[in-house]
Amino acid sequence: MPLDHYVSRVHLKRFYAPKLGNRMYAIRKTDLKRFTPDAKSGCRVVDGSTNPYLQNERAIEEVLRVIEPRYNAATETLRQGKIDPRTVFVLAGFVAYIVGCSPASMRMTSGLVGQAVQMYTTAAEEAGNLPQPPAGAAQTLEEMFQSGKIRVQVDPKYPQSEGINVMLRHITALGNFSWEALINPFDDSPFFTSDFPVAFEAGEQPRSVNRVVPLTPDLALRIRPDLSFNWRDADESLSRLRFSRHRLSRSEVHRINTMIVRAAEDLVFFYRDIDWIPRFVERNRNYRSDNVREEIPARGGSLVVFRHQIVPFDRAANSKSETVGT
């Protein structure tokens, strides 16, 4: 059984510490333990790229073999303020794989699917489209969902299979958005990376979400979505792509690093052992990325919207509940 990396080794190697050679510094958000892994030993799971819902269970590996060897060249092209279709494909592919196929993504999307099943089931019950409950039933389905008596269980490999199926369309969509290369000039405040190196921030358009991705300790990428873009009409010529380059201020670097740490599932990686970093991670550890549901009032009902967001997450409380449940 293969040990598959859900964050590519070529990305993690860019965060190797000069003082450590072929290793990097790391902190776990769960317990704040520090260690120095290499790229091979971090961010990998058994059969992570194997998906039984696909005809070719290892299909994603074919795409990754195209993306990963070109990662370094793509980051350097972006750093120079240039952009070309190959660079876009490689970096968009890196982002699409993290957002659609990583363990954090599987957790988030499983929750989304579970919420959708619950929502449609209770709506069908209210509309009388389900069989009548047994005589004397004390609760409706909605009440049992709310009380926890019943729950929807989703195999995380199912949403991963959907992420793999739409990956090429996802890459094309990202390639038709606005890209901004973010240059970090502060060597005493380098970018972090993590086991989920895509942070989400509120976009300029209502309910839009930007993706902010650390690529190296001094380079990140912001992708601003175009809500008018139709994924079904993917433009492979990337005619709508817009590109700019921005040299960050110290406060902007601090804000982006805050998002990167908060978005991480558990592991935070960095290439310089600076005294402020452990305290910084501790202050921002009780967050993670998730799908957030919003109901918007509409004529005759409501429109339900799901979007990625960084949300509070009490690690101590959740650690205790997981211990009790085992």
Image (spheres, rainbow, N blue to C red):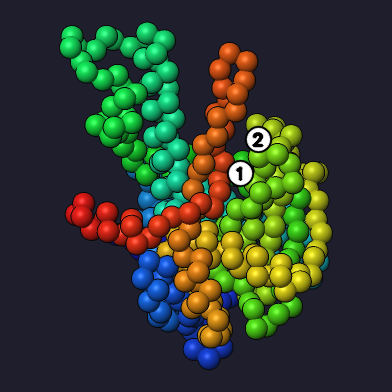
Q: Is residue 243 above or below residue 55?
A: below
Rendered location of residue 53, percent (x, y)? 37, 39
Rendered location of residue 139, percent (x, y)? 26, 20
Between 160 and 181, the residue placed more toward the observer is 181
Please report the residue visible at 41 percent of the width from the left and 70 percent of the height from the top. 28
Q: How many numbered marks have been drawn onto this rendered protein structure?
A: 2
**Proximity of marks 2 and 1: CB atoms separated by less than 8 Å:** yes
- Which residue is tagged 1? 170
Residue 190 appears anywhere in the view: yes
Rendered location of residue 123, percent (x, y)? 42, 18
Please report the residue visible at 58 percent of the width from the left and 75 percent of the height from the top. 14
Q: In which quadrant will I find the N terminus?
A: bottom left
Q: Is residue 277 above or below residue 287?
A: below
Please report the residue visible at 33 percent of the width from the left and 56 percent of the height from the top. 318
Report the amino acid beneath label 1: His
| Mark number, residue 231 | 2
Between 320 and 92, the residue placed more toward the observer is 320
